[in-house]
Image (cartoon, coloured by chain):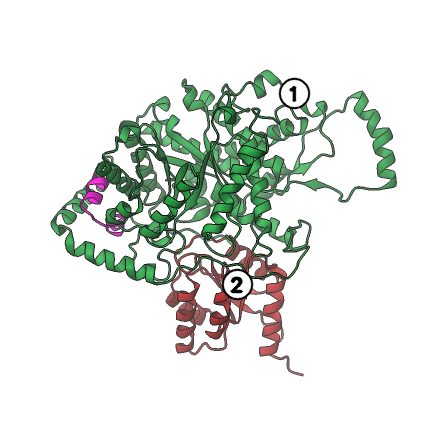
Chain colours: A red, B green
Amino acid sequence: MPGKKIRVLVAKPGLDGHDRGAKIIARALRDAGMEVIYTGLRQTPEMIASAAVQEDVDVIGLSILSGAHNTICPQLMKLLHDKGMDDVTVLVGGIIPGADIPALKQSGIAEVFLPGTSTQDIIAFINERHAKQHPAKA
Amino acid sequence: MSDKLRESVTDAIPERTPGAAEAQWEKTTLKNTLDKSPERQKSFTTISGYPIRRLYTEADLADWNAERDLGFPGEPPYTRGIHSTMHRGRLWTMRQFAGFGTAEDTNQRFRYLLSQGQTGLSTAFDLPTLMGYDSDHALSEGEVGKCGVAISSLADMEVLFDQIPLANVTTSMTINSPAAVIWAMYLAVAEKQGADWKKLSGTLQNDILKEYIAQKEYIYPPEPSMRLVIDTFEFGVKHTPKFNPISISGYHIREAGSTAIQELAFTLRDGLEYVEWGLRRGMDVDEFVPQLSFFFNAHSDFFEEIAKYRAARRIWHKAMVQRYKAKSPRTWALRFHTQTAGCSLTAQQPYNNVVRTAIQALAAVLGGTQSLHTNSLDEAWALPTEFAATLALRTQQIIAHETGVTNTVDPLGGSYFVESLTNEVERGAWDYIERIDAMGGMVAAIERSYPQREIAEASYRYQMEVDRREKIIVGVNDYVSEERPLDILQIDETVAKRQAARLSRLRAERSQEAVTRSLNDLRSAAKGTANLMPFIYESVKSYATLGEICEALRDVFGTYEEVAIT
């Protein structure tokens, strides 16, 4: 389906209100031609999973800076699985200790972006992964 | 409007007419150099994007009057500092922000920091506490003790300050929406220790306006939130004359991505908003304003930061005299705490953060700060380890005792560049302040998302400059290298379990009748106009939990949802 925009849900789970990163990513992805839905603050995994289904998104970007990632991510991945959303790409950005990354990926997180990642790298990652999942018909 | 504003605030350096000698230099020496080798960039700007000239001379200070604009330290307009001897008389308070895990964990860190020569305490609370939820609330899952210490009741607070004599130590508490509740707990601990409230010294952050603007840890809508803040002012004037009931904070505004001028302008306009609400409550300006304190960020652009602090004092003095006819020098003098910029720290090559922090701290000291927190090198990864926190404290001690910058007051005073930049930062801030006045004040401006939008714009602009490598961050978008991972502090889920156990024991042991009665009293008082501090104090003393008290107020006040800007 050439021309169909990649749909991204940018979500801010947990109690934390530091939304600088989430807002920058939302705008950068939109500027890169993606369809972006920003959930706003304080979303539970249930709210994020329901929004993902409702908005039929290809990608979920989670911004977590509070240290709650080991609780939130597995919960969300399970909910997505239960809702038949296994093919959605889930990305995490924020303050994530390196030692936690393997377990997050094990739970199905496609990639973890640490502080200092350029928005261009994230855009490229999403585009490449989307192209792989949806190869253009010859 | 936003674009127009940027033009007027940040893009225009004032016109100047160089003197004959300078004009001659431009035509000869400078021109020869530029003909042979052009400069590295077409234009130079501060980290906030503010344009900086090649050279500052007396031509930049044509309208500047040393007596009027600089004055002497300890005297209006306080450009050179609020004390006549500044750091020769007394060093700033070295106040490292700390808090993690349970009250026991943080109590231990506090006592360690005091034993290492730290001179004041500063408490970081975890997110459930900041949002008014107990550790065992469903929404607290995964967050207990992670970003700070978990405090759900007076019982936790008693442990937090165990063996720390509150009469002799100054304590800062970074808490906003539930600030009145946490303060009541602190006062109750002090009372139990036998400390005289009149002698208690410390600071409550309690700055709800910057929560709506930047950090977003709000519970109630602006109107009742402001009422709670003014209640603490009134209570403080009467019972705790040496305690600052508020720390009006630019720190979080800057961390959210604002420019230096926006940080200054929004913070001072917040300050004016609190003054106006206090006056409306019937307090006299010289009665309560001396207890209001400020809190600024120290970012990496050295001179821009120094200019910001100097301008802050000048603006506050002017506003207090001109707008409110304040008569007390204690009202005129802006006192502030500084924290180095967390958002400037990098996860990559984290040891570089020690250097960044040292430079930022130096700017705060040269800008005349009253107290200082220096960030730890590992904060782009996690809360600091004891090793990293000690190194951060040592950084301040080296500035204080080895660099010599404390030997004289305001060593940069009279510098063409510093004085010009101070003027320009002040002018830019007044421009914003007047715009917000015209909107009907800060609460009105927040309701139309004005400061939020300005900050989002600035933060996006900066990120794009970094992504395009127009602004270089060492180790991130240049000078990149491989490195070994750091040892970092881990907070595990046993903290949440220990907290939950303590809470269920508390709920079983306390008098439920006393709790219900005090919460009912609080609820009915909240429906009226009485000062809520005495009611909150009674609830705290009955061992009602933070969550129960905040819930009682939620029942009456409702909650706030922001319109998200992206």
Does residue B304 appear to the left or right of B105 in the view shown? right
Query: B79 or B276, which is in the foreground?
Result: B79
Q: Position of residue B277 (x, y in %)?
A: 36, 32
Residue lying farthest to the left in this orientation? B513
Q: Position of residue B375 (x, y in %)?
A: 50, 46
Quadrant of the frame with the N terminus of chain A? bottom right
Q: Quadrant of residue A14?
A: bottom left
Label 2 secondary element = strand
Residue B436 seen in the figure: yes
Q: CA distance from mark 2 to mark 1?
A: 50 Å
Q: Residues in magenta?
A: B535-557
Location of mark 2 (residue): A36
Task: Tell me: residue A20, above or below residue A45.
Answer: above
Type of the residue with mark 1: Asp
Q: Is residue B555 magenta?
A: yes
Location of mark 1 (residue): B63
Residue lying farthest to the front in this orientation? B115
Quadrant of the frame with the C terminus of chain A? bottom right
Residue depicted at x 58% and y 72%: A4
Query: B561 or B35, which is in the foreground?
Result: B35
Eye-nearest disc, 2 or 1: 1
Type of the residue with mark 2: Val
Q: Is residue B404 magenta?
A: no
Residue depicted at x 39% and y 66%: A71
Does residue B555 appear to the left or right of B306 in the view shown? left
Q: Position of residue B235 (x, y in %)?
A: 28, 32
